[in-house]
Image (cartoon, helix red, strand yellow):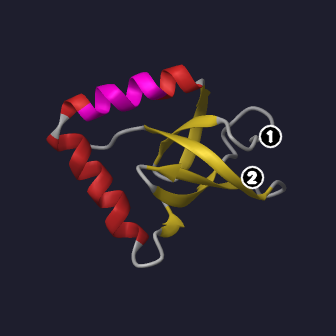
Amino acid sequence: MCLGIPAQIVEILDPEAKTAKVEIGGVRRIVSCALLDGEAQLGEWVLVHVGFALDRIDEEQAAETLQLLSDMGEAYERELAGIRASAGESREGAI
């Protein structure tokens, strides 16, 4: 199962290329923000799927979604494990 997961933008890497570093489940990943309207902003929450920030969400929506995902149990844990495994030793990479 593939999930769109809330992530917080922790660094704007290249405003022209629309790339940013986000944090998902304690892992920092590089994502494309090209699908967002306007420029990505440091600290904002986005919904990430297959390496793309698809939409902005507010902090309350992020918290609610993360709780719902956590309540899913095993499926969410598998998704997070996949993110962590693909990040490798540096715990950073592209999703």
- Residue located at (29% from left, 50% from top): 79
Q: Does residue 2 lie above or below 87 as drawn? A: above
Q: Are marks 1 and 2 in contact (CB under 8 Å)?
A: yes
Q: Nearer the viewer, residue 26 or 31?
A: 26
Q: Does residue 53 lie above or below 19 as drawn? A: above
Q: Which residue lies furthest to the left in this view?
A: 74
Give the crowd class for mark 2: few <14, some 14-19, many >=20 residues within 10 Å.
some
- Residue located at (59% from left, 31% from top): 55
Where does the image place residue 70, in percent across and percent down from the top left? 27, 34
- Residue located at (52% from left, 20% from top): 60
Residue for badge 2 = 18
Find the magenta span and give its range.
63-70
Give the crowd class for mark 1: few <14, some 14-19, many >=20 residues within 10 Å.
some
Where does the image place residue 24, in percent across and percent down from the top left? 46, 49
Dot 1 or dot 2, earlier in sequence: 2
Q: What element carries label 1?
A: loop
Residue 85: assigned label: none
Locate residue 2 relative to residue 27 in the image: left or right.
left
Measure the C-alpha gap from mark 1 to mark 2: 8 Å
Q: What element carries label 2?
A: loop
Q: Which of 54 and 12 is in front in this view?
A: 12
Where does the image place residue 82, in percent across and percent down from the top left? 30, 59
Where does the image place residue 1, in percent across and percent down from the top left? 24, 43
- Magenta residues: mostly which secondary structure? helix
Q: Nearer the viewer, residue 56 or 24?
A: 24
Residue for badge 1 = 39
Q: In which quarter of the image is residue 89?
A: bottom left
Q: What residue type is labelled 2?
A: Lys
Q: What residue type is labelled 1?
A: Glu
Locate residue 18 relative to residue 84 in the image: left or right.
right
Residue 65 part of the magenta-drawn span: yes
